[in-house]
Each structure stands twice: as C-alpha cells, then as structure tokens.
Image (cartoon, coloured by chain):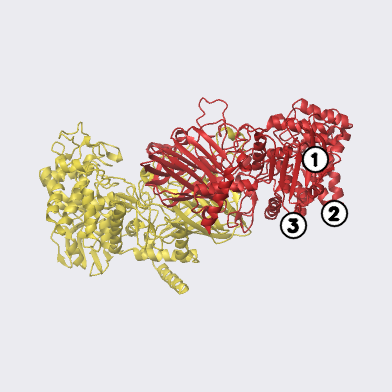
Chain colours: A yellow, B red
Amino acid sequence: MKKLLTIVALSVACSLQAQKQPVDYINPMIGTSNFGATHPGAVVPRGMLSISPFNVAFDTTGEKNLLEKDSRWLSNPYVNENNFFTGFTHANLSGVGCPDLGVIISMPTTGALEVNHLKYGSTYKNEIAKAGYYSNELTKYGIKTEATAATRSGITRYHFPKGEANLLINLGLGLTNEKGAMLKFVSPTEVEGMRMVGSFCYNSPESAYPVYFVAKVNKAAPSYGIWQQPEVHKGVEAQWMWYNGQVRLKEQFAREVVGDSIGAYFRYQFDKEETVELKVGISYVSIANARENLYREIGDKSFDEVYATARINWNDALHARVEGGTEDQKTIFYTGLYHALLHPNLLNDVNGDFPENSTNKIGKNKERYTVFSLWDTYRNYHPLMTLLYPDQQLQMVRTMLDIYKESGWLPKWELNSTETFTMVGDPASIVIADTYLRGLTDFDIHTAYEAMLKGANTLEDNPIRPGVEEYWKNGYLSVDGGIRGPVSTTQEYNIADFAIGQLAKKLGKKADYERFNKQAYTYRKLFDKETHLLRPRYANGTWYAPFNPESGANFEENVGYIEGNAWQYVYMVTHDVKGMIQLMGGEKPFEAQLDRIFDTKQYDMANEPDIAYPYLYNYLKGKEWKTQQKVDELIKEYFQNKPAGLPGNDDTGVMSAWLVYGMMGLYPVSPAEPLYTLTSPKFNKITLRLDENYYPNGELVIESNASDKNIYIQQIYVDDKPLKGYFISQDDLRAAKKIRFELRESPLK
Amino acid sequence: MKKLLTIVALSVACSLQAQKQPVDYINPMIGTSNFGATHPGAVVPRGMLSISPFNVAFDTTGEKNLLEKDSRWLSNPYVNENNFFTGFTHANLSGVGCPDLGVIISMPTTGALEVNHLKYGSTYKNEIAKAGYYSNELTKYGIKTEATAATRSGITRYHFPKGEANLLINLGLGLTNEKGAMLKFVSPTEVEGMRMVGSFCYNSPESAYPVYFVAKVNKAAPSYGIWQQPEVHKGVEAQWMWYNGQVRLKEQFAREVVGDSIGAYFRYQFDKEETVELKVGISYVSIANARENLYREIGDKSFDEVYATARINWNDALHARVEGGTEDQKTIFYTGLYHALLHPNLLNDVNGDFPENSTNKIGKNKERYTVFSLWDTYRNYHPLMTLLYPDQQLQMVRTMLDIYKESGWLPKWELNSTETFTMVGDPASIVIADTYLRGLTDFDIHTAYEAMLKGANTLEDNPIRPGVEEYWKNGYLSVDGGIRGPVSTTQEYNIADFAIGQLAKKLGKKADYERFNKQAYTYRKLFDKETHLLRPRYANGTWYAPFNPESGANFEENVGYIEGNAWQYVYMVTHDVKGMIQLMGGEKPFEAQLDRIFDTKQYDMANEPDIAYPYLYNYLKGKEWKTQQKVDELIKEYFQNKPAGLPGNDDTGVMSAWLVYGMMGLYPVSPAEPLYTLTSPKFNKITLRLDENYYPNGELVIESNASDKNIYIQQIYVDDKPLKGYFISQDDLRAAKKIRFELRESPLK
C-alpha cells in the first residue's frame, strides 16, 4: 500500500514535471534580502520543521555592512548577500522581526574534523531554491548539499567526494539567543537530543523551552560521537587544565551529554564519491514524539520520494491559479501565496500532542497552530485564510480559544505556546470577529466572546490591553499614562472595539454593541486640527509638544507611536473612514493629506500601520483610479522576483498577503467589516479554489484584460452584472461565480 | 513483611543505642582538615551516594588562607575550618587528591527565593557527624538540617521555622570542574535530571559523563519550578536583553531544561514549624535507574528508618573489634576502618546495571566496584580488604578484570568507569597478584595473567606502562626518555614485575618467573653510590646533574620523582630489602640512611612512596624496636581524633588502612609477598571477624598488654607458641587463632 502510494506520488510528480506547474513558479529566494527575513529552505505548507541554509555567523573582522547574527538585530537564518554557509538549521521562523530558533544545525565537511563553525564554514555556489527543496555546492569541500522536508521531519542529502567525510550536528550554534543542549546516541546511526530556544524579541525569557529532535543517518560511520566545546576556564585551575578551551571528542559515547556548545559527528572514509542522507524529526513535546514524527512521516522514504511529496503538496496548496501576466508576475504571486502558507504552522506532533500555553501540560489529539503574529496578521492575512483556507482559519481560531482556555488570555504574539507579548493592541479579538462576520462560524463563539470581553474589560493586570482603565475613562491613552505608543495603542484598541461591537451586533447583544461601537471612535480625541494628524496628548487634555510628525519613521522609538509616525498612523482608521473625512474637513482635504503622505514618501510599505492606505481612495468617489495607480506602483516598486523582492519583514506572510490581494484585485480593507474593496487585478484569469462547505460555488473566477498598461478600471462586473462602486460584500462575493474587470490604460477620472 | 522488618531494624537499633557500639566511635570529622579530603557526610559502606555538607564555595574577597574550591587545588566538598554552607552534595569522593563530583546540591533557605549560593549560603553551628548521619543548624535561617543515606539513595531532612521556606536543588554549583545539567519535573513533588562530572585530576576530559538523579520531596509545595541563571551576554544584543544576567524562574515548567547553571526550587509557606524530607536516588546509567534505586532502597521509608539501617550496616561492617585502649584510640581505629570502607564503592545500580569502561555499553547484572586509586591502594589497602573483606576484595579484582575485558587494559586510576590515567606504574597487576598469593583465588587468573602480560610487554601505545620499551631494554627509564618521574616509575615497574614474577612462579610459569623476577631489581642501576640514593640517569648511562635529593618534597615537580624526592623513594624497594642492604653496604649504613630520613624530617607520612619505611627496621635484626617506636610515634603525631587527624589526603583509605594495621600490630610490608611484618598493637584485644570461606577459624584474636607505655615487643606468640622474628606468613596467619604480643615499656635492644 505504501509502495503503491509512493509510485502514485512519483508518477504525479513526473506528470507535474512535464509542464510548468504553479509550484514551479515559487521562488523561495524572494524575501531573503532587504530584511524580508524569509529563508530559502525546504518546508511544506504549515510545516513545523523547515531546513534552511544558515549563513549569518561568520568572522566579522574587517567586514562592512555586517549581516551577522551577533553584530546587529538580525532575525533570519539566511541573508542572500552573505556567502558563508555553516550548516542547515532544522527549526526556523520565516519573515519575523526578531531572532529565534535557527537551531539543530547539520553540516558536511571533508578532511580533518573541525567543529568550530568559523573554521568549518564554506562559501557556496549554484544555489537552487524551490518549494520544498534547497541545494547548494560548498566550494571549500566540493560537496553538493540538498534539503527537503515533510511537516515535522526532513532530509538533508550530502554528496561527498572520495576521502575523509564528516557530518556534523551542531547544537552550539543557533540564531536564538538561548543556549543549552543535550545529545545522546541511541545507535551508531541515530542520535537524539534537545536544544533550548526562546526569548523571542527579547521577551518572556523565563518561558524558554526545548525543541527535541531525533537524527538518523542512512550510512553507519566507522567513527561517531559527541563533541563538546567547553568554555575557557579562567580561574586558578586553568593552569592545570591542559585541555582548557579545547574541543573534546566523546567517541561513541552512549549516555547523555549536556552543555552549551555540543554536537554530534559522523566521520566517514569514502573510497569513492558517496551520498549520506540525514533524516531529522523534531517535536516541542518530547524526544519520543520527535522520533514518532520522523518514523511516521518519513520512515524509510528516500529523499526523492519526500521531495516529490512536498512538491505535490505545495502545488495542491496554491488555491489561486493565474493565467496571463508575465513569468515574473506569476512568480511573485505564487511565492506570495507560498509565504502565506508558512505561518501559522502546525505545533502538534503526528500523534496530536502539543505543549499547552502556560499550563505546562501536554495537550492531546488536536490540530494545533502556532506562530501568531497578530498585530500584523489581523489586517489582511487572516481574511485571506478565511477566503482560501477556511478549514485552516477555523482551526487557527480554535487554537486561539484553546490558548485563552489554557492561559486565561487570547494570544497576542504567540510562539510555540509561549506568549511573547510583542507589539500592542488586542488583535486576536479582531481576527475572531472578522472570521465570524465573514461567515466562518464553526467555533465556540461564546467562549470567544467571553475572551474578548475579558481582554477589553479587565482593568488591572491586563496583559493584552495595558492601560485600558484610562482608555475607557478618557477614550485615549495619555503620554503620561506609561503605556508605550499611546496614540497607536488607542487606535488599536479602537479597531478591536469596533470588531467586538460588530460581533456583538451580529450576536444580538445590543448593549455591548452600543458600548463598544461608541468606544471605537475615541481616537478622534487625538485628532489635532492644526496638523490634521493624530497627536499624543496628556491625561489632562493638553497636547504633547513640541510635536514632530516625522518622528518615528524607520521604526525609531518616539512618544506617540509604535513602529511608525503620525503620517503612517493617521489613516489607520479604516473602520471610520467617513469619520476621518469629516475630521479632515471633507473629501478634498482627506485626499490632499493622503496624496501628501505618498508624495512626501511618508508612506512605509514595509510595515503594517499604513498598509491599507492605497485603498482609501476607493472611499472617495471619482478618485478610485488613485487606488489602482498606487497599488500598481507599489507592487512594481516593492514586490519583485529577486531576493530583495519584499519591502521588508514579510511579517509571517502579511506583506505577501498584501501582494496576493493586490494582484487579485481585491482587499479586505477594514478588519471586521465583511467586505472587500476592489482594484485592478494583474492577471487575465485568476481562479480561486474555494471550499464548497463555506463557498457553495467552490470556485471564484476573476477575469480581466489586465496587461502592463491596462491598470485602470473601466467597469467591474459580478456574474456579468455591472457592480456599482468599488466594494463588494463578503456575502456577494460568496454568491459570485465570476468577477470581471474591464480595464483601460488611462484613469477613469 | 516490610513493616515487620522495619520493626526488627528499629529494635536492633534501639538495642544498639543502649550501650556504646563500635559504630558509635566513628567520627566522620576526622580527615576533614589538614587536606585529609574526607567529608563528614552521610554514607553507608561502599555507598555510591553520599551526602556531604558543601562549604568550599564562598566570596573570597578579603579572605586569607583560602580553602575555596576555585582559588586553589582543592579536592573536597567540605573543609572543617570553613563555615559557609551552601548545601548538601549527593555524589562525592572521599580522601582523594583531585576535585570531582560534589554535585546535586540541596539547600534549604527561608524568606525570598535566592539561588545565588554566595547570597543564600549560611554559617552554621552544632554540627553532628556520625556514621550514616550528619546534621547542622544554619544560623542565618534557624534551620536544622539532617542527612542520612542508603547505598544509592539518601534523605535530607530540613526543620523549617514558620514562614516562607525554600528548598533548592542547585545543579550549577559543584566541586567538579565540569558543567552542564538537565532538569525536568515529572510531578509537583518529583524532579529528575542529570549533571555532568568528570575530568578528575584534570585528566580524560573527553570522558566526562553524567550522573543521573531523581529527587522527591515529601510535601507538595504551592510553588515549584526550575531556575536558570544564564551567562551574561556581552554582544550587541545585550542592549535589548533587559533580563541579561538575571535569574529566570520557570514556575511549574514540565519539560526538560538544560544549561550550565540551573536548579529546581520548592517554595513553601508554613504557618508553623515544619520538616521537609528530600529523597534522592542517583545512578551513572540512567534516570530510570536512579528512580529504581531510590524506590527500591528507600521508597516509603522514613528518615529515621533509613538512618537506623545505615547505623546497623556500619556497625556490622566493622570486622575488627577492639578492647582496651583509650576512647580516642578506639575512635581513630574504627574511623580508620570506616574510611577504608568508603572506596572502592559500588557503581552498579540496584538492578545490576552499570556503565562499562570504554565500551559505552551498559553492563548488566553485576556487583561492580569503582574508584580504584591503585597507585595508593596496592601498598596496603587491598591486603587489608583481602584479610577482612575477602568477598569484596575478590569482587574488586573481578571488576578489574572486567575493566580489562572492556577497555583492553587493567585500571590504573579508575573513576566511575573512566580511566583517569592518574599517577604512574602498573598497580593493578600488583593487587591481583597479591590477592591470589594471599589465597583468594576465586577469579579468572588466566585472564588476569594475560592482562598483566599485556601491560608489561606492550611496547607501543601502552597506557599503563609508558616507556616500557626503554625499561625492558635498559632496565630503567631515562631522564631523556620523556616519561614523568623516571626513577619513581622504574621502581613502580620493578615492584609490578616482582609481583608478576611471584604469580608466575605460583602458576608454574618458570620462564616468565625468571624474566620478571630478574627485571624486578633493575632499579639498582639507578643506585648512586655517592649519595646512597636512587638518582635520575640519562639513557646513555650518565647521571643527571646537578642532583638535589631534596628536590621533590611537598609534591613539587622534579626530574626524577613523582610526588616525592630521592629520600622518600630510595627504600620503596620492599621486595628487595636485602638487595638494598647490599647496595648500601650492609645493615649499618642501611639503618643509618633510614635513621637519617626520619631524623632530617625527609619522611613524609602524608604520601605513599615511603609509607612502609617505619617497618623496614624489622629487616634489621635487633633493630625491630625502631619499627615499634616509629609506628607509635607516627600514629601519635599524625592520627588523632580531630578534624586534622589524618596526615594528609586519605587516598581512598590508604592512610586509614596504614593506621588500622599499625594499631593491630601488623603490616603487609611488601606487596605480592604473602606475609605481614609485626609491630606492637595498641589494644589489649583485637578480634578480627574473618570469613570462614577463606579463613577457616572465622576469627583471629590479637592480644596484648598494650598501654600508653607498653609499646615495645618482648615476645610474640602465635597460638601460644613463641614466634621467631617479626614476620608471619599469610598461611601461618590464616592458620592462627590468636597472636599474643608481650609488650614492655623499653625497647628490646
């Protein structure tokens, strides 16, 4: 049966090979420069494990423009412009802004055994990065490396030349700032262990936790063991420690070894070219589970079989298929979808076990997601999942509710069942409300609602909404209230309250609706008529001065805002665009201010607060062409088929989701409003494969006469009926079979 | 059944209590000063686990005469003159010269949780140290502590005052220079883990290994968890690590934590005085075995039951009982026997598992010994075991043969199945030959002989006898041969060759006998007629010059000798006293040289090379009274009922064995010669409980009119027949029921 399946998989793989499939457009190199923070390694959709080349640790002497992990704030295991490979990491994050994971490093070398990565590292060439596959050639050794992955396990393959060959598993090196590892050989070909990781974004260090693994080579080595690189002893005893600072080789040592800098080695002597495969399974629960993950997912499967399966899975996971457009456009589109399918990823083992949040218990028998970067993802990512992957989105919502049940709070920035408390606001409430309001209701809405109320109403020791007492009392967080980024955070709370209000309305909770909906617009108290911006304010009502609206650009710390400035936040009120138009004094000044933001380069494509700005022209009758123009310009400027082809951190797929939407011609502009606003698509035909359980037509086709020049909308048709305006409700979209855009070269002014 | 046994044990304990028993004379404080390197902790005979107070880590600022573990070469967990307690260590060595073990530290405190031993440590008072029991009172906290032990497990008990109480298990601190630990809570009252130890005597660092443990409290704590004290990060990232260098508390964390400085805590809030018991089991095989050791040895037993059993076991283990003598004399005698029953200790778990030597395999179903400090113990310790504990001695020999089978070599200085290659010579051959020649033959003598030949004859890569090729060729190791202490080592090889020769003779291997016996006297080539000393020599035969015979005193490094000088080594030829008399030019100059060594204070009671010197007068007719005088003087000067009551390192019981012999009036003066030489005993009656399987009489009584003044021998009677001379063969001793010494106040000149 297994063999049969394998043959089927291979034959499908072969037929996939025959013509270029969507999967073949995926270019994992996109985002590996310009701080995109993605990696080009092998991974499957929502994989717990990924295998990334690790090239951010090198000798910094004499280096300029350092992209070295310990020399700056660097959050990725791989940077395209670097060229010093020190191994493959088997647990990684993609597109995040803080360093963590990047551990369980495998490295092939030749010649004498060397375990110091600064010495054993190698430059490389001939990189190949495809969905589920990565390869390079190590110039120092003449070794070709390859990597492929299953969900919780993966394989690296090393093509060694004749002679001495070494395969290292380095547990000392890592992207994370945590240290500490354990290793134990259980047979000459199998080693098990763990590595401490955590303190993501320099938060929650007390929650640092182990990632467990089992690693197995397919060829027994005549020599194998554990190395240990102890710290250099500096005390009196150093004079007797002739081995002080020297590496220790524990040949064939069969008990546990623990330490900060340890690793396993396999030493071969090949009399001809030989390949060695290293299979690794990981788990966040136990070594036994890591082993089960490895044996049940990969077992005896070959590298080629595992890769063939990964490729099929990726091809199948691309629920939007495009026709027309250039090869580069197809590449950035499919790669965008690919990036949107990395996080949240599965946390549960193949047997359903996972570490619970805060309880120190092992949860059982669930599909559990992790890596919730919700300040980022509430804005567009989760609506995209709601549309294209509703089952996954529902399970993510259920995971959030489980986290609430376990920890007492909804997640904010969750990573492997630890809450990192990164960023601000109450984003989980928005995601859950948005999901429900868009029609995915198959979760425990009562618990969800209870969780939202707790986050909104708990006045003291509230980890989700610090300062909420002042917020409810005054409507805004004050400069002197002690909460970081009081303007930003007020806006975030407003958006969450809008979402909760909309949900309350839907659920028939009228009093709650009125209370929350009223609170959703209190940001207006921060509107400064002088600058037409939101401005920090003291508790007593006086304005913060001197007020420099530019302060806060490029992520610099400032008084009012989190990762942004007044320009980048003023229009982050998509639930109240009409209100903001009023505040501005009408559509004209609103438009002028928006124009000014773009014209003066205050618009920051690389971060989330202003991510919806280009779509705000759709609220101004007759100005919709500016949305079409801006989106087109921004895609062309920031999203390209090259390593620097993302505007900045992908933020667990949020930038990629923005691109995917932009190229499809629609955008969920206002969280918790079940609608999309529309812009010109970039392909002639886009077929969305929808889940019939939630979208009865099972498919939505977006057609257009898109071309490089045809970027402006003449008319939109839904199922051949002209659409009035540039918005479509979730219900109308659900009912539609086809949206057709009639495009033109010049703006429809 | 269990209950019944307990009651029996307790009632025996009670009857023991009624009158002062031998066990009650044991004073574990002896040897805890003056670098005796014993510890006063709780332990049972040959126990794998011991629980020692740990007081060698403190703030050294402004301290003089530092006896702090990192400030000098310090080899013991406890020094009597120190007074800063930082916990109980659960794995310790006794009387050795290098730091190792001293780990798994438990510490009670009160008030806020503090895990830095420099801050949580306390002075103490009211120390009580008895066989199997230790107690003190921590002045900082008002906590009384107690410790008792079984073989592989033990209990500490803490009497907390009302209020906040903490129990720490500190895996960061340790006497060993190794680092690295793992911890995992398996229930609110039970934590398991491991701690790396090894690199004993700064040797074999690559063999560092884990000691596993399970620790269980008898009262659940409302708060418990793991602390982690990470290193202070110094790189660029330190600026974002607000927690840099701060202790992390991982409350109720239930997965593994690994790191160099971690520990477990239990935090109580007591509304009255309360006691907490901590039961710990250890193993060198696995955590599962540590748990089995704990549960099978102690299980539900109370502290008092375990101590009662320990006390009975100690009392029963004292196979020599004395009458007469002072209380202090009884104390030092029984304590000497006690110290001789600590090492070698059991290495196998209760289920028979143990780590093999060099194979990385787990041996099964054996009684396995460890801690073989053979350069020390071959001289007198093992003959004492052969006499009083023949079953144990045989099992130690069998262990040595297993080590040979496992590693390819007999042990030299073995510790927990690692060979530390400390000191020089081929001592295991001597021990095995001596054991066989003294009549304990129930082991595989053919394998033993094969092992001896391998050690003696392997010319290259010989870890036991480096330089042996030159030794066989020239008869001695040369100054230029590159081997440390060439004179000492030549002498050691000679003694081993004598032993092998004697065994060969016994086994009827005539050619081997002749070859080895001839080689046994080659030290004579190093005899320098000018100084009447052995002198380092070059390979070409010229003498090393300038030659300073004093060089090497007090353990200083020197050209010819290991831990000694020419005076301390010249008479380390007890297999060839007659030959040495000839070299010296007759008995007179031999005696004069020996007198000179004592008179000029060149004699070093604190180390082994000259340990038999006082007995050499017995080889000089009419001068035997000098042996009686010297032994009496040395006992009185160096062996006393006080912490500084050992001359120096106990050397795993060798100094104590010397004392026990000296007080019994006999000494195994020449290894592998099955005889004892005699001196005046210190008690009126000494009853040796002998094993009838090896000593048919089952008992040997040594009687005398010993007193403080009666220290000289008038006549010795064996079974009432006058003994001619001052030697008795092993066979005659085996046949004897009673040896009676007629003593007098003045020398019999």
Q: Mark 3 belongs to which subunit?
A: B
Dot placed on the residue nearer the N-terminal end, 3 or 2? 3
Say if B12 sits above or below B28 in the image: below
Dot placed on the residue nearer the N-terminal end, 3 or 1? 3
- Could you say which quadrant of the image residue B65 lies in? top right
Per the image, label 3 sits on a secondary structure element best described as: loop
Q: Amino acid at mark 2?
A: Lys
Per the image, label 2 sits on a secondary structure element best described as: loop
How many residues crowd around disc 1 within 10 Å: few (fewer than 14), some, or many (20 or more)?
many
Q: Cα distance, mark 3 to mark 2?
A: 16 Å
In the image: residue B373, left or right of residue A2? right
Q: Cα distance, mark 1 to mark 2?
A: 28 Å
Camera-near label (3 vs 2) is 3
In the rendering, which numbered label is found on residue B444? 3
Residue A710 in view: no
Query: Residue A705's x, y, as percent?
Result: 23, 62
Residue B616 in view: yes
Query: Residue A703's x, y, as percent?
Result: 23, 64
Residue at the disc numbered 2: B509
In the rendering, which numbered label is found on residue B677? 1
Question: Contact (CB < 8 A) between labels 3 and 1?
Answer: no
